[in-house]
Amino acid sequence: MSAEKTVKFRSKSRKERTTRILIYILLTIMSIVWLIPFVYLVFQAFRGESKSMVNYILPKKWSFENFRILFKETNFLSWYKNTLIIALFNAVLQTVIVLSVAYALSRMRFKGRRLIMNIMLILGMFPGFLSMIATYFILKLIGLTSENAIPGLILVYAASSGMGYYIAKGFFDTIPKSLDEAARIDGASRSRVFFRIIMPMSKPIIIYTIMMAFIAPWGDFMYASLITFGHEEAYNVAVGLYKWLDKEHINSYFTVFCAGGLFVSVPVTVLFMALQRYYVEGVTGGAVKG
Amino acid sequence: MKKVLPKIAAGFKKVKNKAHSFIHMKEERELEYLGLTPARRKLHNIGVFFLTIPFMLFSLLKKIPLLIGRFFAGIGRFFAGIGRMFKEGDFKTRLSFVIMGFGQFFRRQIGRGIIFLAMEGVFIYYMIGFGFGYLKGLGSLGTEAVTKTLNKYGLEVLTYKDNSLKILLYGVLTIFVIVGFVWTWYINVKQNYTAQKLIEEGVRPKSFKQDVKSLADEQYYKTLLSVPLLGIVVFTVIPIFFMILIAFTNYDYSHLPPEKLFGWVGFENFKTMLSTDISGSSKFAFTFREILVWTMIWALVATFSNYFLGMFIAICINKKGIKFKKVFRTVLVMTIAVPQFVSLLLVSKMFADEGIINSLLQKLSVISDKIGFLSTPTLAKIMVLVINLWVGIPYLMLITTGVLMNIPSDLYESAKIDGASGIKQFTKITLPYMLFVTGPYLLTSFTANINNFNVIYLLTAGAPKTMAYDGGAGQTDLLITWLYSLTVTNNDYKMAAVIGILVFLVIAVISLIVYNLSPAMKNEEDFQ
């Protein structure tokens, strides 16, 4: 009886061990697949010979030549500066707007609240690019396209950010209302409650909002390509680097693109990794509450 | 006519009876229903849901006259209210019907009075100097684009006159300004009336100082929402409204302002887009249908493949006894962190015909001819779906990891004691729990995938192109990327606007169905 049991037990543990090994193999293969593009990016960025695509991975000559071209011979630095300015402004403006909207809709009850939320839901169902064409004409009207595209882009990002309040509202909804009420009984105004009670408790969501607002402009291609159209000085990094991969440029700019891509990715990635915890909290919170 | 109406009524009755008998039937079969396995029950529920769609539509149709009635009743009440305020108001109130803020001045609400008066001034100035002309032009969108005159040297000089685009845009803007003004005017009148009533009762109306103070307190939402909502109106609502109108014009490459005018064409563009006649001169209808089908397939496959594989990977990483959890997670998260235009553009170059993958495969003599990963139609479609896994799995891994941690562990323990296998635990505990908790996320990610511009545009930009499609569309184009190329490269704004509206309708219908379905899914008690 007992012998039978041990056999059974051992077979189970053996089975578990094989599944574990299988999982390790799977995860390792996956990690490699996931890392390949980044490794490739780094190798290409430091490749000294030939600026075009080549049929081998490891560079024959390592050099910083691509970075030198990037900074000295192209507009990359001004694109980088543009994107950084936009990202910084966006981080401030979008955070203020998102938190304001989320707080108002989560904590206060007023006439038209449901209406506002429903309208924003419906507006969100329109493809974003649809409104972009008219947005472009409106910006052109105020003179914020082409050479003035940077303030224009900041304005557009900030203006439409109010619709992304869901995650922050979901967070505010979880803070007990009794806290507000207690403070209100003690004579605190709504704004005081907002700044003194809710804000200090919302550190994760504030960091999440700032982080997303800062990172988003680095990857925006759609809006930026339209609004900066035809004015190279005003491009952001995405639009600028994208041009280097078209048929005319790719043979002389491929490795420079990789260098530029690396130069953009590293700070964003480091920031992201450092604040990963908040990202996970925000994203799971948002997904779970919908 | 008289004969038809009772027939319709009888028809309605029949439908109603059917609905009743159908619901009755369900009750009778309740025992049978309870005897089904849970999976069968789900199927049954879904079947019932689809069977009830006609009845739902029917009841919705029945509601429409009611809603219209309510709408007009609301308008009636609005005017009745204004009339009553005018009748009962004293001369200060009545005068502020014309001169906004007048009553406020004499009721010691000088701050409010100044604001209202200034608003009226600005509005009148705007309308006379700017708005009225454009509003008048909205009907025709301009009559003459350019005039040629000879200058004193006998040379032709072009003068641009009417610009349809500007007329439409400023016209729309003016409509919004007017709506806003009417609203302000109504508030002004109402405030006067309430202030008058308060004074009659012997209460002093609020001073400007109190007003400002209340904006930080009871009315704090006004402070918080005014700027964001203004931004949304100007940069989202007005543009969408404008583009919806564009769909009813002939604004395209052959009607480009300022050289040419465009005008209203009614539902012409929708007819072109939705016509069932494929052999017609325009291939738009055909292209649209093909791309719509591919968009739906893409959204469905992309959402669910990411969802299940992401969940699978998360379960693997979180399995007890697996080491280096953090390493695996960090590797995956890196794909989220690196901007997509870098990673996806690079991947698209790696899979290009001359790319590194083809070169390596040739070198290792696995293949002799290059594989057109992104340049042969079917393979390109499969490739974008596969590469999308590379993009999407990390997100799902993060989300599902969070949710997995929240599943009460005693559920698994009791399942283990009952001798449930790993697969059984997954299908009976993990999957239902996940589906329940992340149900709303599935919907949002489905709609996000319909509008997934980045992955398609950066990977293939819609290529491979085909002659069978109109409007510069390619085989992997989604509606959203087609919309982009229609506007940016083809200047076919009218068709882009039509597509945008149709995308909206598709998403709205799907969301509506899922929202209606979710009460069945959201059986909260199952998990508490």
Image (spheres, coloured by chain):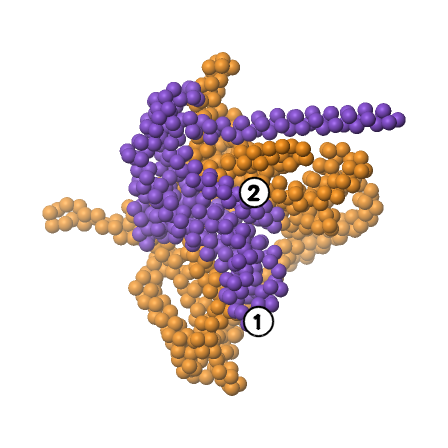
Chain colours: A purple, B orange
To the question of a shared chain for discs 1 and 2, the answer is no
Instruction: Check disc 1 and report its element: helix, strand or loop.
Output: loop
Amino acid on which disc 1 is placed: Asp
Measured Cα–Cα span from mark 1 to mark 2: 44 Å
Residue ID at (40%, 38%): A264
Disc 2 target residue = B445
Q: Position of residue B500 (x, y in %)?
A: 47, 45
Q: Is any part of residue B56 visible from this angle?
A: yes
Q: Position of residue A110 (x, y in %)?
A: 55, 66
Q: Position of residue B295 (x, y in %)?
A: 53, 37
Neighbours of disc 1 within 10 Å: few (<14), some (14-19), many (20+): few
Q: Which label sits in the foreground, 1 or 2?
A: 1
What is the quadrant of residue B227 in the picture? bottom left
Residue ID at (46%, 84%): B90
Residue ID at (48%, 80%): B205
Amino acid on which disc 2 is placed: Ser
Q: Is any part of residue B309 visible from this angle?
A: no
Residue ID at (33%, 51%): A144
The tally of labels here is 2
Work out which quarter of the rendered image holds the N terminus of chain B and state it: bottom right
Instruction: Check disc 2 and report its element: helix, strand or loop.
Output: helix
Front-lying residue, A263 or B423: A263
Circle number at residue A186: 1
